[in-house]
Amino acid sequence: MVRRLTQLCLSALLAWAPIASAEDTLVWLLRDLPPLTIFEGPSKGQGALDQLLPILIERLPEYRHQVLHVNRARGMQMLREPTFTCDPSLLWTAERARYIVFSSQAFVVASNGVTVRRNQQEAMAPYIAQGQFDLQAFLDDHKTRVGAIAERSYGPVIDERLKHADAHKLALHYGNDALGSLLQMQRLGRLEAVLGYWPEIRYHAMQQGIASDDLIFYPIQGSAPYQHTHIGCSDTPQGRQAIERINQVLHEIPQEQVQQSYASWLDPVMREQYLRDNPSFFQDSPEP
């Protein structure tokens, strides 16, 4: 009996030892961002980042790991605080770099753009030229409104347009299902356009019972076709040390694996273009 109890205690100690030896708890901040992270529905947990994060966690055994689901605004608030938090799907901006330390490139994604309803295509024609959407002209028109997620970066060109737009032209949503709510507002005629990634918009439209054929996506005039996403941690000693380790892990993971996991979520036309362009953009971003 004593021998059996000793064996059980030893087994418990061995099971607990790797956790006890980890001094810090790294909190991963995840937001619902299909096709990178998927919180609900039949594809729950099957996003491209959903596949990458377990690899990162496995290769960072020196930390305890906790996953926390947050909306964009809450995530940015936590990253500003002196906590040990990391977000695995951030765009680099100069403002964010004041309080976030960024990894090398994690993903390359097709850029944000704007979605309009097909039955509004004729009304939106003045803002569309050569298949691209003139966001500045749209914002200059006093009769239009665009939906966006609060505290989200859409890339330098879009961010600059929104920064100088009149507040009444923007419908900023802070909620957990922000994009789904914005798409519903658009369907009800309260918005003319919604910003986002096309695969993300298609996924949320499906969740809201909106047929993707009812929507048309346009790239934003002046924006690059692709954006580099990074892992970002609070700029603290713990965060800076973690980024050094994260960069080591990212360089060990075959880029083709990361590329294919994202490309599988694109529509056939976008997927073909993404894979064709791969040699020219799938390299470290010029940002830190």
Image (cartoon, rainbow, N blue to C red):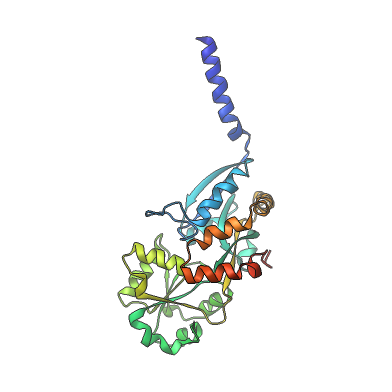
Nearest the viewer among 263 and 3 is 263
- Provide residue 152's location: percent of width, then percent of height: 51, 67
Q: Seen from this angle, which residue lies furthest bottom?
A: 126
Residue 197 shows in the view: no
- 279 left or right of 142? right
115 or 241: nearer the viewer: 115
Asked if residue 77 is positioned above or below residue 241 in the image, the reply reads below
Q: Residue drawn at (52%, 51%), measured in percent from left and top?
A: 51
Left or right of 66 in this view: 191: left
Q: Residue at x 37, y 53 (%)?
A: 42
**Which quarter of the rendering shows the C terminus?**
bottom right
Name the image quarter holding residue 101.
Answer: bottom right
Q: Residue furthest top?
A: 1
Could you tell me residue 155's position as x and y percent? 56, 72
Percent position (x, y) of residue 137? 48, 87
* Residue 136 seen in the figure: yes
Q: How many marks?
A: 0
Query: Height in image: 41 above or below 141?
Result: above
x 62%, y 44%: residue:
59
Give the percent coordinates (x, y) of residue 39.
42, 54
Residue 267, above or below 144: above
Tell me what residue is drawn at x 55 percent, y 59 percent.
260
